Amino acid sequence: MAVETTRGHAGVEVRLEELSRRYGPVVALNELNLTLAPGELVALLGPSGCGKTTALRLVAGLEESNGGRVVFGGKDVTGLPASKRDVGMVFQAYSLFPHMTAMENVGFGLTLRRKTADERRRRAGEMLELVGLSGFADRYASQLSGGQQQRVALARALAIEPTVLLLDEPLSALDAKVRSRLRDEIRRVQLEIGITTLFVTHDQEEALAIADRVGVMQSGHLEQLGPPTEIYARPATPFVAEFVGLTNRLPGEVKNGVVEVRGTRLPLVQPDAPHGPAIALVRPEAVSLSTDGAMSDGPLVGTVIAVAFLGATSRVTVDLGDVRVIAQMPTSTAASTPAGTRVRLDLRNDPVLIAREEKASVDA
Amino acid sequence: MNRSRRLKLRIFRTVVLLLMGAFFLLPIGAMVEFSTRGNSVISPRTLDAWVLIAQTPGLVKGIVTSLQLAVITSLGMLVLLLPTMVWVRLRLPQISRIVEFICLLPLTVPAIALVVGLKPLYIWININVTPSVLALAFAYLILVLPYSYRSLDAGLAAIDLKTLSEAARSLGAGWITVMWRIVIPNMPSAILNAGLLSVALVLGEYTVASLLNFQNLQVEVAYVGLTNAPTSTAVAVGALVLAFVLLMVLTLVGGRLQQHNYIPGQRA
């Protein structure tokens, strides 16, 4: 299914079939299968070394695969070198050619395609305008800020009207404010042009914010691929649950399709899980606090030890004695439970994933 | 830093500069004095020795030969070394130490040992390829390797070669375009320095040419020096001045190119 764009046209389908890459004995990518619908933006998310950048570099043709195929719009491009693949790429490091102005940088790919000087100027001008930098055409890279350089790099990648746009952590070198602004800008431009885009990042907020679908990777394979809301709300594996968002790890006992955590029975995502001790993975927003009634000792009664202000919401850390639990709530609610307050935890009746490790803690 | 310390530092710098200047300029001054001296101490100054350069066929030929060798060696070095270093950095970083070792090796090999090693090869080249003196460029390529390697290595280290070349390739550039349009324009100073070092070394080279029985500038200068010392000294001064002028020109050009690329401190 093609993704609708504001310009009404869509890019091509991109397929990665059984794509593998090994570095000696290390398997960086293990038979990865991934299909990007025309015009879709898919973000590959995962920790360092999970294979996401390798996958992107194989699509770009900057590395050779040990097996599998890369297909653009039905055409197998696996054997083509990077220069013949017709991809636009924005790199993590600043990649503008220092000896060229912004205009010359954007026009570089067009020069290689033997466009006339007029065509180059017109197209480069359009692209710079698209990224809001038409007033910076004559500046060199050293005269541009980091965010501006990445915007010019985006304009340069798009100027050649590539089949696929590849973004290799293009925001990671920028400060938080610029990163957030440029992230929205990339999405706007991508939707406007309707180009199929593969975006690699280790920043979950970035991936969840702009992607149509997010692929969470670990050890060279996809753990889960789905829309951001699904990835967050219904993680398929404990790894996804723990990598995306904050997760409380609470020891419990699995029995008859539910897990009993400190006297509270929670349904399981996989009701057929074998009986026995397990760690329930509970989202902070599924935990609420109450201060009414008697605060005698109980399995879910504890003391607030920290309140982290995040703006509209706050994170409250409660010490239950043998384990600490984080609850996320509106800041106005959290204000009534400052550090030192005795509180009772309530766990929402959402289906939870379980892990089998013995460790009980809170992981970010 | 307080004022008196700054003053002391300034005086120290000036003294060092004057001493170094004297160290370099006194011998050259003495050479100029000797090459313009008349037949006796009381004779007036004369440029006869300098005029005689143009009238000594061997010298003119030696100058032309050495300039040709300088150009061939510099270009050959760039064509051979730059793509190799770029390739090693991008594709075979694991052998970079071996390449560095090989490039620096000529520093440790005495000229006479090099000549003994190269002699059979030159006999073969003489018979089967060309007896031209320009074949000396091959030996000179080996001699300039260490200096050129260091200069180019510093230039390559100063740019993000991997990202720039990958960005160019993703835009459709082949390897020759990457070299010509991206790598070379981004390291003008390093390339000019490597070229200059090669030119200076070739213009001043005597041992290898002499032992291999080729006539280059320095061999001719030594030969002329046996019969006409002032002219031989004039040529030596001329070669020094030429190298100095080249150095200045390349420094100015390199500085201007560099300034064009990077304007430090100016950010939007």
Image (spheres, coloured by chain):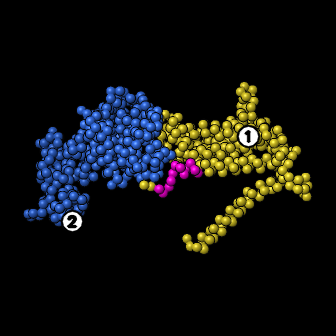
Chain colours: A blue, B yellow
**Which of the 4 image quarters holds residue A192?**
top left
- The three-letter amino acid code for the residue at tag 2 is Ala
Pick the residue in front: B221 or A322.
B221
Which quadrant: the N terminus of chain A?
top left
* Tags 1 and 2 both on a single chain: no
Taking B9 as reference, is B121 left or right? right
Residue at image position (32%, 29%) is A73
The residue where tag 1 is placed is B66
* Residue B11 horizontal/vertical position (percent): 66, 68
Residue at image position (82%, 48%) is B50
In the rendered image, the residue lying farthest to the front is A118
Taking A94 as reference, is A249 left or right? left
- The three-letter amino acid code for the residue at tag 1 is Ser
* Residue B253 horizontal/vertical position (percent): 61, 48
**What's drawn in magenta, residue-wise?**
B255-266
Asked if one can make out residue A27 in the rendered structure from this viewpoint, the answer is no
- Secondary structure of residue under mark 2: loop
Taking B71 as reference, is A124 left or right? left
Q: Is residue A354 magenta?
A: no
Kindly identify which numbered label has been placed on residue A339.
Answer: 2
In the rendered image, the residue lying farthest to the left is A293
Asked if one can make out residue B235 in the rendered structure from this viewpoint, the answer is yes
Is the residue B183 above or below the residue A251 in the image? Answer: above
Kindly identify which numbered label has been placed on residue A303.
Answer: none
Residue at image position (31%, 32%) is A12
Q: Is residue B257 magenta?
A: yes
Marks 1 and 2 in Cβ contact (< 8 Å): no
